[in-house]
Each structure stands twice: as structure tokens, then as C-alpha cells.
Image (tube, rainbow, N blue to C red):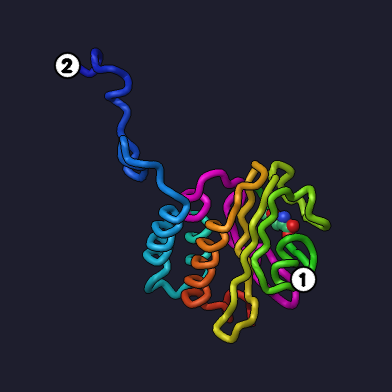
Amino acid sequence: MTDAHRPASASVPSDPEGPERGAPAPTKADLYAELLVRLEGLVTGEPDWLANLANAAAEIYTWLPGLNWAGFYLLRGGELVVGPFQGRPACVRIAIGSGVCGTAVDRRSTQVVADVHAFPGHIACDPRSRSEIVVPIFDEGGNVTAVLDLDSDRVATFDADDRAGLEAVAELLSRSIDWGRACGS
Ligand code: SME
């Protein structure tokens, strides 16, 4: 068969990253297990915090479905300052205790927000965002040093599986990033 007579579908290359045809759809746990392997491969042996956080933000944003923003806020000089991210430009500085990010730092715990419009004090960087998860990242001394923030343009995107998966990501980054340099201390 010449290319001119080949059915259109036969000429579309398969996505090397996509699931095999006929394979069951991956669960969130599968997605996060693979994400962890990919992130570990990106940061292992590379000491540059900026390169590592930039690649981590890009990997998370492209690997997980349904995101309109993914990235980091770094704790610098007593406030959160935006770090490497993917998505639309974001607010630069967030006070501890403000918004979802500042609340995650204040409470030292992951915040899963099903509907950002129902979260008092939510900071709307991108008006398309409808749900959000923010995970604190701790340094080796147990101090919050940054947060990992993911936004979705649909309500209730994030659940307990996302929380577990992203806390594992935060734990990996906790031990792989030079947080002293990242936070300018
Ligand atoms: N919505 C966040 C602000 C950061 S953006 O989502 C990127 C908050 O309320 O803290």
C-alpha cells in the first residue's frame, strides 16, 4: 500500500509515552509511581536546585492530566516567592497564612481544595483555576522550605491518591534539592 492509500489512522505515529492499545487505563497510583521514577531520573546526580525544580515542574505539568498550573513557591525572607513553574504567570509573593499556599506553610500540612471559590482567602492567579492542591516541602531539619502547588480548571480534581502521590514527590525533592541555596539562606 502506498502512503497515499494508507488509512489516515495508520499514518499517525503511536504516542511513545501513551498507554498501550487495549491496556487498562492507568490508575492515579500508577501515574504517581511512574512520575516518581521519572523525577528521580531527572534530579539524581544534578546539584543545581534551579535546574532540578524547573525540570520537576515541567515533568509534573506534562505527566499529570488536567492541570493548568504546576510549580513551586519558595520560602524566602519570611514569605513565599514564586519559583519554577509551568502555566500562566502567577502572583510573585504570598504571605505566610495567606491563600492556599500560605495556609499550607502555616499549618505544615497538605491543603486539598475541591472548590477554590469556597476557600476563604484563596488567591486567584489564574481565573480558570477551580481546584487546587498545595503540599509543603520540608528541609532535613523539618522546617517548611517551599510548597508544591497544582491547579486544575475543574472542580474536585485532587483526592487522597493525589495527596499521597504528591507527598511522595515532596519527600523526594526534600532530600534531592539544595534548599539552602534555593531559599537564599
Ligand atoms: N491559589 C494560590 C496562589 C498561587 S496560584 O494558584 C499559582 C493560593 O491561594 O495560595
Task: State left or right for residue 99 relative to residue 178.
Answer: right
Task: State left or right for residue 152 relative to residue 40.
Answer: right
Q: Is residue 91 visible?
A: no
The part of the chain drawn in magenta is 59-87
Q: Residue furthest right?
A: 120
Image-quadrant location for residue 11:
top left
Label 2: state its secondary structure: loop
* Magenta run includes residue 70: yes
Q: Label 2 is placed on what type of residue?
A: Met
**Image: 148 above or below 141:** above
Give how far across and how far down residue 104 sits, in percent. 70, 67
> Residue drawn 37% across and 64% down?
41
**Image: 113 above or below 136:** above
Q: Nearer the viewer, residue 12 or 163?
A: 163
Mark 2: give few (<14), some (14-19) or many (20+) Cα within 10 Å: few
CB at mark 2 closer than 8 A to ligand 1? no
Q: Is residue 101 visible?
A: yes
Quadrant the N terminus occupies: top left
> Residue drawn 65% across and 42% down?
153
> Which residue is disc 1 drawn over?
96
Give how far across and how far down residue 163 sits, in percent. 57, 61
Ligand 1's quadrant is: bottom right
> Residue drawn 77% across and 60% down?
99
**Image: 164 above or below 108:** above
Quadrant the C terminus occupies: bottom right
Counting residues from the start of the chain, the first of labels 2 and 1 encountered is 2
Main SS of the magenta part reads strand
Give how far across and how far down residue 161 sits, in percent. 53, 57
* Magenta run includes residue 89: no
Q: Label 1 is placed on what type of residue?
A: Ile
> Which residue is disc 2 drawn over?
1
